[in-house]
Each structure stands twice: as structure tokens, then as C-alpha cells.
Image (spheres, rainbow, N blue to C red):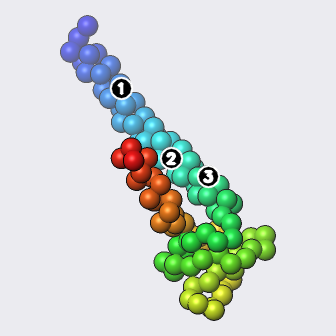
Amino acid sequence: MTPMTAATTSGGTGSLLILLVPIVLLGFLFLSQRRRAQKLAAHQQSLKVGDEVITAAGAYATIKGEDGEILFLEVAPGVIVRWQRRMIMNSIRPSSDLDATRDTETGE
């Protein structure tokens, strides 16, 4: 094998590797984003009256009612606004749930 042939063979593998790494990385990012979106959609569908939530705009509120994809949120005492269910980004666990979690972690 001549030096020219060896250089051509290894250069082809290197080029293929340079093409495959970004494709694999993009595939991984796509799948992880899809999993994250599915988890968020499942969380949004599991919301119920009485849950404390945080909206996409950062407002803290309590769910007072629901009508399909519309949630009625109380953002201040006596102030109820309508939000689309998909605009809820997170929910706040009640302090009693947090205390129960701490107790099980500490063994008390």
C-alpha cells in the first residue's frame, strides 16, 4: 500500500465520521425534546381544581375551575382569569406533600 492510498482511505473514514457525529447529535436532541414535550403535555392534562400552578408568564395561581382546555385561575383573592391549559408550565406541591416527602427521606 502506498502512502497516497493510506491517506485516501483514512481521509474517507474521517469525512464520514465528521458527517455522522452531527446527525447523531441532532437525533439525540430531537428525541430528548420530544420526551420533554410529552412529559409536559401529560402534566398539563393531569391538572385538577385546587392545584397551585405557575403559568408560562410566571404568574402564580390556583386552579378554581376548568372547561376543557380552559382553566380558571385565581391569581389574587377574588380575581379569576382564564388561561389555556397548555400555558401552565409547572405546578407547586402543597407544603403537606413536601413535609411527607421529607419524612420519608429522613425515615421519621
Task: Name the residue carrying label 3.
Answer: 38
Instruction: Return the x and y of residue 39 as percentages of the image width and height.
Output: 58, 52
The three-letter code of the residue at mark 3 reads Gln
Looking at the image, is mark 2 or mark 1 nearer the viewer? 2
Q: Is residue 41 above or below residue 15?
A: below
- Note whether 61 is above or below 102 in the view shown: below
Visible residue check, residue 11: yes
Q: Is residue 56 visible?
A: no
Residue at (43% x, 34% y) in the render: 20
| Secondary structure category for the residue under label 2 | helix
Residue 67, horizontal then vertical, whole percent? 78, 74
Q: Is residue 34 above or below residue 96?
A: above
Q: Quadrant of residue 40?
A: bottom right
The residue that appears at 66% across and 86% down in the rendered structure is 81
Nearer-N-terminus badge (3/2): 2
What residue is disc 1 on? Answer: 12
Q: Can you tell which of label 3 and label 2 is closer to the viewer?
A: 3
Q: Is residue 36 left or right of residue 74?
A: left
Say which element carries label 3.
helix
**Left or right position of 75 against 64:** left
Q: Nearer the viewer, mark 3 or mark 1?
A: 3
Q: Amino acid at mark 1?
A: Gly
* First reached walking from the N terminus: tag 3 or tag 1: 1
Q: Return the x and y of residue 79 as percentages of the image width and height.
A: 62, 91
Tell me if mark 1 has few (under 14), some (14-19) or many (20+) residues whose alpha carbon lies within 10 angstroms of its own: few
Residue 51 in which image quadrant: bottom right
Q: Secondary structure at mark 1?
A: helix
What residue is rendered at 39% in x and 37% in y?
Answer: 21
User: Residue tagged by mark 2?
Assistant: 32
